[in-house]
Image (spheres, grey):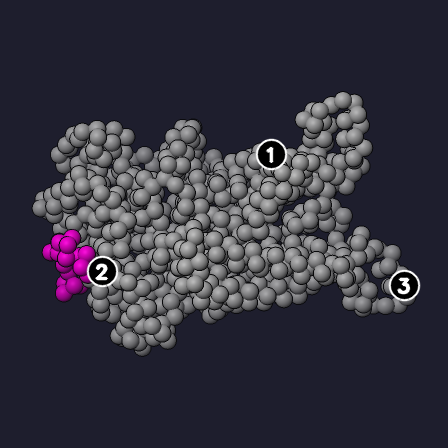
Amino acid sequence: MSYLFDPDNWEWLWTGNNFRFLLEGFAVNLQIAAIAIVLSFAVGLVLALMRISSRRLISFPVGVWVDVWRNLPLIFIILYLALAVPGSWRDAYGEAVPDFFPEALQDELVLGALLGLVLYNSAVLCEIMRSGIQSLDRGQREAAASLGLTYLQQMRFVVLPQGLRRMVPATVSQLITLNKDTTLVSIIAIQELVRHGNTVAATGFGVTVTAPILQVFIVVGLLFIAVNLALSRLSRRLEIRERERTGTKPTSVRGLEDQVALESDTTGR
Amino acid sequence: MESKSRWRLIAIAFATLLLVSLGIAACGDDDEEETTAAPDVEVEEFGADTTMGKIQEAGEMNIGVKFDVPPFGFNNPQTGEVEGFDVDLGRYIAARLGVEPVFREANSDNRIPLLVDGTIDLILSTMTITEERDLEIDFSEPYYVANGDVLVPTGSDIQALDDLNGNRVCTALGSTYQETIKEEAPDAELRLVDLYSQCLELIQTDAVDAVSTDNVILTGMVIQDDTLELLGLNYTKEPYGAGIPDGDTEFKEFVDESIQQYIDDGTWEENYETWVGQYVPEEQQQGPPDITLEEALKLFPLEK
Amino acid sequence: MSELWGVLEEHLPEFSAGLWVTFRLVAASLLIAIGVGTAVAALRVAPLRWLNRIGGVYVETFRNVPLLVLLIIAFAGIRRAGIPIDPWVAGIASLGLYTAAYIAEALRSGVFAVGKGQIDAALSLGLSYPRTMRRIVLPQAFRTVIPALSSLVIAMIKNSAIVGASLVALPDLLKSARQVQADTAQTNEVFFWAAIGYLLLTVTATLGFRYLERTYAIKR
């Protein structure tokens, strides 16, 4: 116990560059998460629309695709892509990334990480959106259809605006999970918070103050708690507002751990 | 209503913390523009159709080094820079082209894929020359000769390779030791990790009984923790070569020349002293490699 | 094509050893997760405010910290503090305690589904609080949350891969696959079979839970 609270073991926190080094790493996690959630949302939406298509030729293969990626470990997907992504794609990514993007994201390795994150999360979001859309009263869609709106118009003006709004809390919840998942990219040598934490804790080479790994990673954990807690509060408030607005209960989707927690949070209090 | 505004305050506080930390991180980058001075070497211009020419056009050279293996390649949080023997050699080669070196992390697992797909131009990552690797990439002439050794806590029962049997031994996933240890001590319990710094962590917390890899990497660990010691077994000879894309003979010529010059003009000795020599007792000091690439390849021939 | 089967033939021992490790890891962690999760859920719904708070802290901590960070703390961190924890124990504890937070929340919603009415009725009939929980509320709560449990078990199977990839380095399915890949460089074939391995586990779990659902679940 005394090891935990011994002030000597915490001295590293305000010595030299250590804490800033950790924050720099954390910035990389957050940036990757931000880009990944946006891309996953876009791809997920497309997948969801295909998934609910009445044409089996489209909905069935997409369904299989989504189910496969959802059931594989994310770390597995990321490791595989890191090894298997062809060099030409990496070069293309290197060219395509705009210059104003932060330095860490210019690294071509990030492509493998982003691909993995997006492949997985788009599948997960697809299922969230599918339920969001399908939970909408059938009557509305039929009414829209009888008014002569085409499928796309129905989607654009009736279904999606309402369905998407219901899914915002769930998407924010997925962002929390995504934040945590970005730590996995440390395993493919991307310099983010866990990597930086390892470096700070490991380097006894030429440093006067050692940083014990327990304390370092407690700080890492606290950083994540801070950000994710804020996000979950935000998500909960959005959900409460949605409930007050429309009097509907937010959709619950089978197969998503955070979704379960999210739902129960608001029934409690 | 009260709890609602309380939570809002907390949410805002956290969001502010987040923004502040991002701000600090962003500001931090500005201070670290000062890089180490480039070595003083002659720059030669190359034709645009050679790898060297392309690198010169790009203005920078991507070099894969270790980020967690002092004294050859490690990312120093205090200076924000990557430092080490491999790193300095990389600077030297880049200086010969008159370009800036950009160092990327290349661990034992991903360094070859990164070279093969062009993310990096050169590997300088404590990489042992083996015939199997030679199938996928090309090597330069050896620039350093390390030896395989075993690291144990002082006073350990493990004194010889045989003693590894029945004990937990740590090494890196994808390194030559993954195979070698299985051969030398088939009953050893291998714990494979991604980074040697993790091996150090494991042995310091008694989660493994020994670490086996190149003695230079192990020396880096002893420097950090003097309750550990090297057994001095030197059971393998590990010539390090720079990794070059397969079949690029011109580039290989250039790199070989650079290495030769590096040795001839005394820079090798200098850097050896800085990074290794000052930590190693007199008897174990060594000079530049005396082995050729051909001989090195014979040390690790293809099996099967 | 023949390469694909070739890889399987040659390396089946490694793959199955890895699969077995993953299975044991998930099974043991599940027991911890259900045990701890139930306890925390009980805290969360207890009539005492400060008990709720303790449960709340647990849940918020373990839901917001990445599993990888937990593993490092549980293994390297604890060992540094002087406690010689074993990699298996560290792995099972991390995965178990992490998932317990989610199980606690799921059970909590299950308890509320059972309804305050039943709890009040039981208490007014003279049953003690723990008795009420144990005999009346929890059995129904469990049956309500079977679908959620199903998804949590699948999440656990996926998260188990992180344990092997961390410095806890248990030789699970993914680790074994990476070892084989490092030896043979046949990336696609190796990862294909590892994927099949994981899908085997997740599909079995899904089917198992579907059976449980049909037999026991209470539809809300």
Is there a contact, CB below 8 Å, between mark 2 and mark 1?
no
- The circle drawn on residue B304 is none
Q: How many marks?
A: 3
Q: Chain of mark 1?
A: A
- Where does the image place residue A37, in percent across and percent down from the top left? 56, 38
- Where does the image place residue A11, in percent across and percent down from the top left? 43, 53
Type of amino acid at the residue the image marks with label 2: Phe
Query: What residue appears at the point 66 percent right and 63 percent down from the top-left corner?
Result: C34
Residues behind callouts 1 and 3 on a single chain: no
Using the rendered view, name the quadrant where residue B1 is placed.
top right
Foreground pick, B17 / B168: B168
**Residue at image mark 3:** C124
Residue A214 seen in render: no
Q: Chain of mark 2?
A: B
Type of amino acid at the residue the image marks with label 3: Ser
Using the rendered view, name the quadrant where residue C125 is placed.
bottom right
**Residue at image mark 2:** B300
Q: Residues within 10 Å of mark 2 (few under 14, many from 20)?
A: some
- Where does the image place residue C18, in percent across and percent down from the top left? 48, 64
Estimate the spatial distance between the alpha carbons at disc 1 and disc 3, rounded to whole Å. Answer: 54 Å
Residue B162 seen in render: yes
Estimate the spatial distance between the alpha carbons at disc 2 and disc 1, rounded to whole Å. Answer: 52 Å
Q: Chain of mark 3?
A: C
Query: What residue appears at the point 79 percent right and 35 percent down from the top-left corner?
Result: A137
In magenta stretch: residue B224: no
* Secondary structure category for the residue under label 2: loop
Left or right of residue A16: residue B143: left
Type of amino acid at the residue the image marks with label 1: Val
Query: What residue appears at the point 19 percent right and 39 percent down from the top-left corner?
Result: B251
* Secondary structure category for the residue under label 3: helix
**Residue at image mark 1:** A46
